[in-house]
Image (cartoon, grey):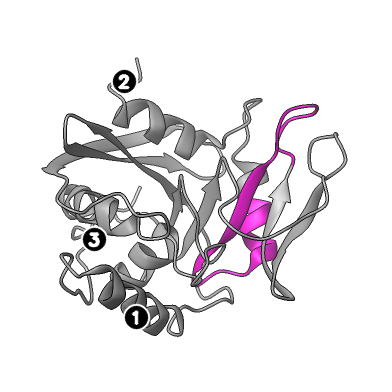
Amino acid sequence: MRITLNIIPKTTHPWDLDPVSAIALQRELAAKVTRETAFGPVTTIAGVDASYREGVARAAVVAFSFPSLDILDYVTAERPVDYPYIPGLLSFREAPAVLDALEKFPLTPDLLIFDGHGIAHPRRLGIASHVGLLVDKPSIGCAKRRLVGHYDEPARERGNYTYLQDDGEIIGAVVRTRTGVKPVFVSIGHRISLNAAIDVVLVCGRGYRLPEPTRWADRIAGGVYPP
């Protein structure tokens, strides 16, 4: 377990942008995302998710040892949701609370995995890419539902996957994490290749559809804590 300074954004921007300006910023930031693996050995991985209740976003960050997947620590952070619900701009609602949680976190994980999309996004900047880029950490998007693109259904056995494509570009993978269960949508966040992201998601499986880091981030963001 590596205890260092908190994860502080390397760069930032206003979060109250109008939709036209927010879309323009997404396109600008998407061009800066690194789509190849750019990190060393992974010994810690953190799941990230956010939930909403009565106008408040509650973000959770949960760190695990890797690959043994023992919970090391977790934090939550809350802040009012000021940005309207606009499909494709959800990171402008969630990311401020997520960044608050990351800044509170006493660990610096080697890799972040988000319950959401990375480049599998209309402008190639879902929350995993958006936040991963701002904090300059390797990150993966692992979402429950498709946002954009088309795919063939993967074979029903665990470990099979097909590619998610949009406008002739591979933007992610549709990965079967449990035999006979709906797949998840895996994509590059920042500083990782798609093949490496798929491998990490499969290693993080513990018999559930969702990988352990995001499964627990989802639970803790919703108010259910580990024993």
Segment tinted magenta in the rendering:
176-200
| Location of residue 176 in the rendering, given as x and y in whole percent from the top left corner | 74, 40
State the quadrant of the C terminus.
top left
Residue ID at (44%, 78%)? 30
Checking the image for residue 225, the label placed there is 2
Visible residue check, residue 110: no
Left or right: 163 in relation to 124: right
Q: For the residue marked with disc 3, what is the amino acid? A: Ile
Q: Is residue 124 above or below residue 93?
A: below
Q: Is residue 215 above or below residue 83?
A: above
Residue ID at (19%, 65%)? 8
* Element on which disc 1 rests: helix
Measured Cα–Cα span from mark 1 to mark 3: 26 Å
Nearest to the observer: residue 146 or residue 79: 146
Visible residue check, residue 97: yes
Residue ID at (33%, 57%)? 91
Residue that badge 1 annotates: 24
| Location of residue 4 in the rendering, given as x and y in whole percent from the top left corner | 22, 58
Q: Nearer the viewer, mark 1 or mark 2?
A: 1
Nearest to the observer: residue 213 or residue 65: 213
Q: For the residue marked with disc 2, what is the amino acid? A: Tyr
Characterize the local packing of mark 1: few (<14), some (14-19) or many (20 or more) Cα atoms within 10 angstroms.
few
Residue 190 falls within the magenta-colored stretch:
yes
Residue that badge 3 annotates: 7
Q: For the residue marked with disc 1, what is the amino acid? A: Ala
Measured Cα–Cα span from mark 2 to mark 3: 23 Å
Measured Cα–Cα span from mark 1 to mark 2: 38 Å
User: Reading the chain from its start, which is encountered first: label 2 or label 3?
Assistant: 3
